[in-house]
Image: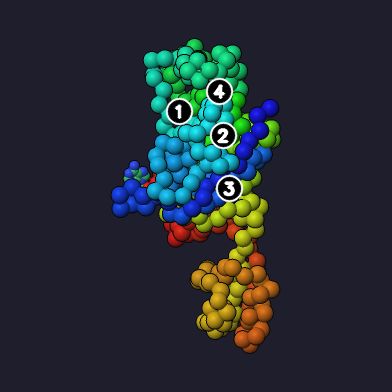
Amino acid sequence: MPTGVPIEIRSLTKSFGAVEAVTDLSFTVQPGQVTGFLGPNGAGKTTTLRVLLGLVAASSGTATFAGTAYRDLTHPLASVGTALEAASFNPGRTAANHLAVYAVAAGIERSRVGTVLDQVGLTEYGDRRVGGYSLGMRQRLGLAFALLGDPGVLVLDEPVNGLDPEGIRWMRGLLRALAAEGRTVLVSSHLLTEVQQTVDEVIIISRGRLVYSGTLDDLEAGTTVVADAPDRARLGAALRGAGSQIEQGPDGLIVTGVTAAEVGAIALAAGVPLSKLTARQEGLEDVFLELVGEGDRA
Ligand SMILES: Nc1ncnc2c1ncn2[C@@H]1O[C@H](COP(=O)(O)OP(=O)(O)OP(=O)(O)O)[C@@H](O)[C@H]1O
């Protein structure tokens, strides 16, 4: 059984002329779990993955597999399986033919072609030309290619994009099973909801910088407090004075970054009687949008 190694991104910066796509980015992706690599469009996910896979050079910093750069891997396809977005397959060739060509070139047993087609549910379509494939079938073929060398690490760019709900459920099961075997599985997406039930860990970037790295559970624990007082302005001033972030909500002040008990204590200390105090679990997507600075657009 292939075992995964950590993916290590260290102080990675990548500029394209005047555009800094990735800035001083550091994170580690551990084996044995599915990690989501999240951020809105243009956040720098694809750039990070392209540097990791040796497709573009970093401006500074490193992106390695346990210290080894992709180009220095002895057997790349057998170590790291990749499916980048918009993978291009010759439309005139069949899926089985495509995979066989790659297998032969990489010295991988031809029997793996049937195995991976089976793994991704394309066995009965293996002899059809890829030109007739739906987006979802192309995604499955991309994954079949990634699995061809039975690698310990999988790097997948937007793998559920284009899949129907049934396909997403299937992909979730497969990725979780691959991680449970000890592989390192990194899955990028611009939608947290799309991968929410698939990932254990999340890395969130925005404008090329890390904004969150940790478990999905910890991310979910973000709470908001709604508080109100007959004298709302005084309550607002007291909370602001204590360093809390507040905004006007329909039924009170929405306070972030503190617990309900802390809001109560701040109000008491300021001598402001409260008329309302409730802790509200934020929707996960709200937390995500807040982190990436798109809360206003939610
Ligand atoms: N080859 C390039 N030349 C110039 N700018 C680039 C190039 N590649 C990416 N960028 C810029 O770098 C930034 C990050 O892009 P990137 O594609 O990495 O983001 P992303 O998070 O993958 O977004 P998406 O989800 O849309 O793919 C963007 O501002 C993009 O315009």
Q: Is residue 294 left or right of residue 122?
A: left
Mark carried by residue 135: 1
Front disc: 1 or 4: 4
Residue tagged 3: 28
**Label 4 sits on what residue type?**
Leu
Front disc: 3 or 2: 3
User: Measuring 49% from the left and 53% from the top, which residue is drawn there?
Assistant: 11
Using the numbered discs, state the Cα–Cα distance from disc 1 to disc 3 in whole angstroms.
31 Å
Image location (x, y in percent) of residue 199: 61, 43
Residue tagged 2: 154
152 is higher (above) or lower (below) than 9: above
Q: Is residue 235 left or right of residue 279?
A: left
**Label 1 sits on what residue type?**
Leu
Residue tagged 4: 148
Q: Earlier in the sequence, mark 3 or mark 4?
A: 3
User: Measuring 62% from the left and 38% from the top, which residue is drawn there?
Assistant: 5
CB atoms at circles 1 and 4 under 8 Å apart? no
| Quadrant housing residue 8 | top right
Q: Nearer the viewer, residue 161 or 25?
A: 25
Q: Nearer the viewer, residue 177 or 122?
A: 177
